[in-house]
Structures are given as C-alpha cells and as structure tokens.
C-alpha cells in the first residue's frame, strides 16, 4: 500500500432545514392555529481515529465530503428529519489544520479520538413558534442555518516511542528487523527505505515499545534534498531519537562527521527535535576496523555510544535495556499540555 502522510480535503457540514408555515385544517376546526414545524438539523463532518489505518491514501481519491442537509419542517408541528453525519477515518497521529487560516484544529493521538471538523447548521423555526397573544396567525418562519465549510490539511505524524535515524545504509532496517517482528526492505544501496516502517519490541522484562524506521537523511535534508526531509515531521512525534552511525562506511566517509551532519539537519529542521533524548548506536560492529572508529566516536561524540551488530547480535540486549530505561524515566515526567481543539 502506498504511504501518504499529507492530504488536503474540503468538508461541508449539512445546512439546516427551513421552518414550515402551516395552519391546522381539520373538519370542525374552522380556525385552526399555526402548526408549522421546525426544520431538521444538518449533519456534522466528524474526523475519527481508526488505529488500523497507517496512511491517508484513501483521502487522496476522495478529497470532498458533504454531510446531509436537514429537511424542512412540516405541518402538524412535525420537525424535519436531521441530515446524516459524515465520518472520516484517519490514522493515529493525524494533525488537522485549517488550510485557510493555518490554525491547528486538533492533534489526534488517541485511538478512537474524534473531533467535529465542520459543524452543522441549525434548523429554522416554523410559524408555530411565533404565535403570541397579539399575533395568533403568524406567517413568519426561519430559514435553516448554513453548515460550516472548511478546507483542511491533514498531516500524519507517526506515533512511536523511538525513531531510528541516520544516513542511508546506516543499518536502520536491519536493526529493526533484529529487535522486532517488522520486515522492512533491506538491500545494499541507498534509500532502501522509501516509507516509514514501525515495529513493536517486546523485552525480557515484559515491557513493550514501538520503533519507527525512517528513510535515511542526507546533508541538506531540511531544504528538501534526498528522501528523509519528507519524514522529518515523523521524528518530532517520537520520544527518543536512536541515531545509527555506520562505523565502517563503504564510501570511506568519517563516522564522526556523519554524526554531526545528521545532528545539524535535526537542529535546522526544529530546535525542539534537536533536544530530544538521543541514543547513539555504533552499528556494524562485526566489520574489520570497527573498534578503532568506535573509540573515536566515544571520544568525540557528546553522548553515550552503544556498539551494536545486528548480524552477530552483539549489544542488542544492552541497547534494548538502555531504551527501556530512558522511556521509563520519560514516563515519570509530566506530559505536555494537550492541544485543545480550536473549532
């Protein structure tokens, strides 16, 4: 399935039905009073999280949504039927933005969470509502209100505990396949990962966390170079950044410089992103000469460096344990205030 993480849609809530002008007409009731009913309420446009979805692909082929209109009122004080709601299902982690104002309406991060993206118009009052002692036969009625109309931009940001980042071919996909049941594409050429892959890691201590393998970053990614710039927003949602460094790059580049290249891209994209807790992983430690570069990394990188070989299994248990330890510390900290819906 194609991965789509951004889409623009048009939504229109249903209009309310008009009120009715009617007078009671029955045998033996020659002067029946007003009995015009109210118009029905229009339908709302609701956006709801479906935890089984992982892409916005379905919205690409259907970019317009119109809820049902309320029906007019009828005689005998009958209220018109309400319009049907429209429910749009989106993946967990979808952010909803008003395209015209730039206002963020909601950030859907809980399974089953929903918002009313466009509110329905109310039905108008029928003439029975306007009867009074001075006007016993009113011919007044109200038209139904128009439903709200909006252009919305939906942006998907993956919800994961750990985001795997690094240069292309740093070994992210191989590591994810080793620590979880995920099966990302693995090959010996750059940009093997063309879309994020998420795996669930079960630990020996019966704790569980999710890991997202994100496409490789290159220098200039924040300006649109390579593939990774399209997915930098997904790293913002993670709690920990797991930064993989190939200790023996096939292109002969310097692992220390590679580390700083990625750190610069994170900082240029978002200061908040650059301040996330980081786990530095020296990958491919089974290669000849890896120990020498590991020593350099540990002396020149301002963070703890964990040596790992996804092939031999070296350091895998220690890495998982370290991630669990950091996540437990973060879970003891108060959560930031949730973004209130601004509808």
Image: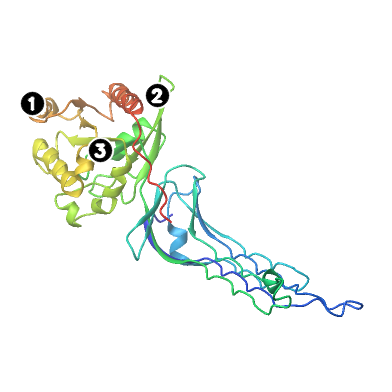
210 relative to 296 in the view: left or right: right
Mark 2 secondary-structure assignment: loop
Closer to us: mark 3 or mark 2? 2
Q: Residue furthest right?
A: 28
State the separation of the CA atoms marked 1 and 2.
30 Å
The one nearer the camera, 291 or 219, is: 219
Is residue 275 shown above or below 205? below
Mark 1 and mark 2 in contact? Answer it, CB < 8 Å: no
Q: Residue at x 33, y 63 (%)?
A: 101
Is residue 211 shown above or below 307? below
Mark 1 secondary-structure assignment: helix
Crowding at label 3, few (<14), some or many (≥20) Cα neighbours within 10 Å?
many
129 relative to 221 in the view: left or right: right
- The residue to which callout 1 is attached is 299
- The residue to which callout 3 is attached is 171
Mark 3 secondary-structure assignment: loop
- The residue to which callout 2 is attached is 203
42 relative to 129 in the view: left or right: left
In the rendered view of the protein, which quadrant contains the C terminus?
bottom left
The one nearer the camera, 257 or 42, is: 42
Q: Earlier in the sequence, mark 1 or mark 2?
A: 2
- The spot of residue 16 in percent (x, y) is 59, 69
- The spot of residue 301 in percent (x, y) is 11, 31
- The spot of residue 28 in percent (x, y) is 92, 77
Q: Quadrant of residue 8?
A: bottom left
In the rendered view of the protein, which quadrant contains the N terminus?
bottom left
């Amino acid at each position: 399935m194609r991965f789509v993480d951004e889409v623009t849609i048009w939504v229109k809530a249903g209009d309310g039905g008009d009120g009715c002008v009617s007078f009671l007409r029955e045998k033996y009731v020659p002067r029946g009073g007003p009995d015009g009913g109210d118009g029905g309420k229009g339908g709302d446009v609701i956006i709801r999280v479906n935890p089984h979805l992982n892409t916005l692909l379905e919205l690409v082929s259907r970019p317009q949504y119109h809820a049902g209109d309320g029906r007019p009122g009828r005689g005998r004080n009958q209220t018109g039927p309400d319009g049907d709601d429209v429910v749009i299902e989106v993946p967990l982690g979808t952010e909803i933005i008003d395209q015209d104002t730039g206002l963020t309406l909601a950030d859907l991060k809980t399974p089953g969470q929903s918002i009313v993206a466009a509110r329905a118009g109310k039905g108008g009052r029928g003439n029975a509502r306007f009867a009074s002692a001075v006007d016993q036969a009113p011919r007044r009625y109200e038209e139904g209100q128009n439903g709200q109309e909006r252009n919305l931009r939906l942006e998907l940001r993956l919800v994961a505990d750990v985001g795997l980042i690094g240069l292309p071919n740093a070994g992210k996909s191989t590591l994810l396949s080793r620590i979880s049941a995920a099966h990302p594409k693995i090959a010996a050429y750059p940009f093997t990962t063309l879309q994020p892959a998420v795996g669930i890691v079960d630990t020996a201590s019966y704790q569980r966390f999710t890991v997202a393998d994100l496409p490789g970053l290159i220098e200039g990614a924040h300006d649109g170079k390579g593939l990774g710039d399209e997915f930098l927003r997904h790293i913002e949602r993670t709690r920990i950044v797991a930064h993989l460094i190939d200790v023996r790059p096939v292109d002969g580049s310097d692992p220390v410089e590679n580390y700083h290249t990625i750190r610069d891209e994170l900082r240029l994209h978002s200061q908040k992103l650059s301040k996330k807790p980081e786990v530095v992983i020296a990958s491919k430690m089974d290669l000849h000469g890896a120990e020498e570069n590991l020593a350099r990394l540990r002396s020149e990188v301002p963070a703890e460096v964990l040596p790992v070989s996804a092939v031999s299994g070296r350091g895998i248990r220690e890495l998982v344990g370290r991630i669990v330890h950091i996540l437990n510390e973060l879970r003891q900290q108060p959560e930031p205030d949730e973004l209130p819906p601004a509808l």
